[in-house]
Image: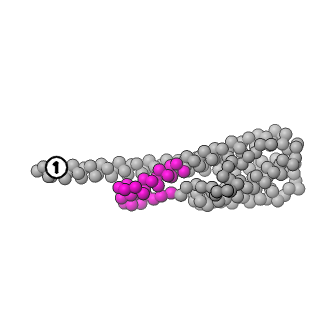
């Protein structure tokens, strides 16, 4: 009879551990999804600010057509990549967009009246704030991805992960040495 109680206790402990491990994975996945949603919100905010910024600069520098086209193309590519939900692809297009924005600000530096324009200054401040929020959201997302990936890989959690098809997620990484590893500097 004692062996039966011991076996029953072992089975109960295993079931309890499986339930706890499963719920832990659900928490990690929900945190990761939530943090990705934070990045998504900030990227959309950035995409909404860019056309206003381009239009403001266009009024002062109509002959700088190439810079405007590059920003517009990079914005469209980044918005398209966002639909894929693939952090690696999104990071690549965000790198391109950050580079295009830097060239736009370089154009803006050549126009002293533009630098003093209140609309431009407000858009600059908003974009700088958004870039900082994107960077913070990216760090938060990557922390959650790290925690989820670790839980998927460690034993014995990997047994539960395999049974319920919990898988690792990609980090939202910016390329080393790219223009987007730091927020776009918009100060004059």
Is 74 on the left-hand or right-hand side of 117? left
Give the labeled residue for mark 1. 5
Residue at coordinates 87% horizontally, 51% vertically from top-left? 61
Viewer-proximal residue among 10 and 60: 10
161 in the magenta segment: yes
Which quarter of the figure is the C terminus placed in? top right
Across and down, in percent, residue 68 comes to: 80, 56
Q: Is residue 79 visible?
A: no
Residue at coordinates 24% horizontally, 52% vertically from top-left? 11
Magenta segment range? 142-169
Across and down, in percent, residue 57 comes to: 83, 49
Residue at coordinates 18% horizontally, 50% vertically from top-left? 6
Viewer-proximal residue among 18 and 55: 18
Relative height, residue 41 to residue 63 (above, below): above
Query: The residue tagged with tag 1: helix, strand or loop?
Result: helix
Exactly how many numbered labels are in the figure?
1
Report the magenta stretch's main SS.
Answer: helix
């Amino acid at each position: 009879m004692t062996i039966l109680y011991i076996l029953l206790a072992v089975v109960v402990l295993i079931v309890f551990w499986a339930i706890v491990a499963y719920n832990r994975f659900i928490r990690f996945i929900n945190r990761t999804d939530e943090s990705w949603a934070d990045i998504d919100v900030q990227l959309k905010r950035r995409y909404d600010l860019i056309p206003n910024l381009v239009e403001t600069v266009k009024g002062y520098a109509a002959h700088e057509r190439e810079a405007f086209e590059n920003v517009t193309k990079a914005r469209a590519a980044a918005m398209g990549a966002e639909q894929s939900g693939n952090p690696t692809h999104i990071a690549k297009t965000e790198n391109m967009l950050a580079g295009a924005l830097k060239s736009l600000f370089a154009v803006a530096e050549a126009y002293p009246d533009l630098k003093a324009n209140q609309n431009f200054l407000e858009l600059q401040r908003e974009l700088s704030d958004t870039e900082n929020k994107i960077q913070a959201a990216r760090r938060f997302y990557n922390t959650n991805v790290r925690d989820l990936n670790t839980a998927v890989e460690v034993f014995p959690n990997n047994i539960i992960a395999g049974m319920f098809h919990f898988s690792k997620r990609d980090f939202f990484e910016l390329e080393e040495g790219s223009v987007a590893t730091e927020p776009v500097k918009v100060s004059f």
